[in-house]
Image (tube, coloured by chain):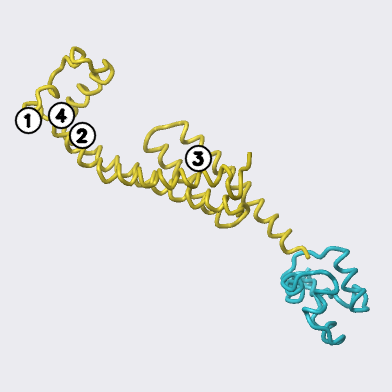
């Protein structure tokens, strides 16, 4: 997928554990793990909002677009 | 009425198909003996052992006229045609058993609230193909229609499964 979720990087910068962050944003550990590993297919606005609030960052810090090879060829 | 989950129509159907599976299995095991017996009775030698079987006027014995006519038609068939009935019966029994077993698993999944799942898609797809195979073997238009409807249901469940995946992976 072209959109990469940089949650692991931001969490490492803030020195936050997965379990702790999951509790603070009212998500289960497994759901946050899905986000962290990039397996998620979509993210709700309120989840993104909670993540930005707790990690004190912007959505752009969490999400990154990387063009596919097929996209660059076009 | 509850259709999925515990104490629902699906759980009842799972139990019924489980019992039906054993009934069909027992019938499949016992029927070759009955079939061989019937074929033997339809031969001139068998008719001499059991005179009733050779009687053309079965109506007088209180047998249903249609059954009596069918029996006479069967008696007049060539031996090879009569013997073809055995593998034909086994093919039908095998397909029926496979359908019943897959239906048991499917209903058990429904009873456990597992509806939109790739496993169910595969099961419904196989059941529909087996139903179409049975309809071809038994020349049954109704079975063919059921098979086609099941193929459509399979596509619906497939679409539902992809939607379910998307919902499950929306955080």
Few, some or many C-alpha atoms within 10 Å of disc 2 (few <14, some 14-19, many ≥20)? some
Q: Is residue A2 above or below residue B66?
A: below
Q: Chain of mark 4?
A: B
Q: Residue B28 location in percent, x, y?
A: 29, 44
Visual hue assigned to chain A: cyan
Q: Secondary structure at mark 4?
A: loop
Structural distance between the alpha carbons of marks 1 and 3: 43 Å
Q: Determine the residue positioned at 50% across, 40% down.
A: B147
Judging by the rendered image, the residue that carries numbered circle 1 is B45
Visual hue assigned to chain B: yellow
Residues at discs 4 and 3 both on one chain: yes
Quadrant of the image containing the C terminus of chain B: bottom right
Structural distance between the alpha carbons of marks 4 and 2: 9 Å
- State yes or no: discs 4 and 2 in contact (Cβ < 8 Å): yes
Structural distance between the alpha carbons of marks 3 and 2: 29 Å
Q: Secondary structure at mark 1?
A: helix
Q: Secondary structure at mark 2?
A: helix
Residues at discs 2 and 1 both on one chain: yes
The numbered disc on residue B42 is 4
């Amino acid at each position: 997928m072209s959109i990469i979720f940089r949650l692991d990087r931001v969490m490492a910068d803030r020195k936050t554990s997965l379990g702790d962050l999951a509790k603070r944003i009212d998500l289960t550990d497994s759901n946050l793990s899905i986000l962290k590993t990039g397996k998620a297919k979509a993210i709700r606005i309120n989840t993104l909002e909670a993540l930005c609030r707790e990690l004190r960052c912007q959505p752009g810090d969490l999400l990154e677009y990387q063009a596919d090879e097929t996209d660059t060829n076009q | 009425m509850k259709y999925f989950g515990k104490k629902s129509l699906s759980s009842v159907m799972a139990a019924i198909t489980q019992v039906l599976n054993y009934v069909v299995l027992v019938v499949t095991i016992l029927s070759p003996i009955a079939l061989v017996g019937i074929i033997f009775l339809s031969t001139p030698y068998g008719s001499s052992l059991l005179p009733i079987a050779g009687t053309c006027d079965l109506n007088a014995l209180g047998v249903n006229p249609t059954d009596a006519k069918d029996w006479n038609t069967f008696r007049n068939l060539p031996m090879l045609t009569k013997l073809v009935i055995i593998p034909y019966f086994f093919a039908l029994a095998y397909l029926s058993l496979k359908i019943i077993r897959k239906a048991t698993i499917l209903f058990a999944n429904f009873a456990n609230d597992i509806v939109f799942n790739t496993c169910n898609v595969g099961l419904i797809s196989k059941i529909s193909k087996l139903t179409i195979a049975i309809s071809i073997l038994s020349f049954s238009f109704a079975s063919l229609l059921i098979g086609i409807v099941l193929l459509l249901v399979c596509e619906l469940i497939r679409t539902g499964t992809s939607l379910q995946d998307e919902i499950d992976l929306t955080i």
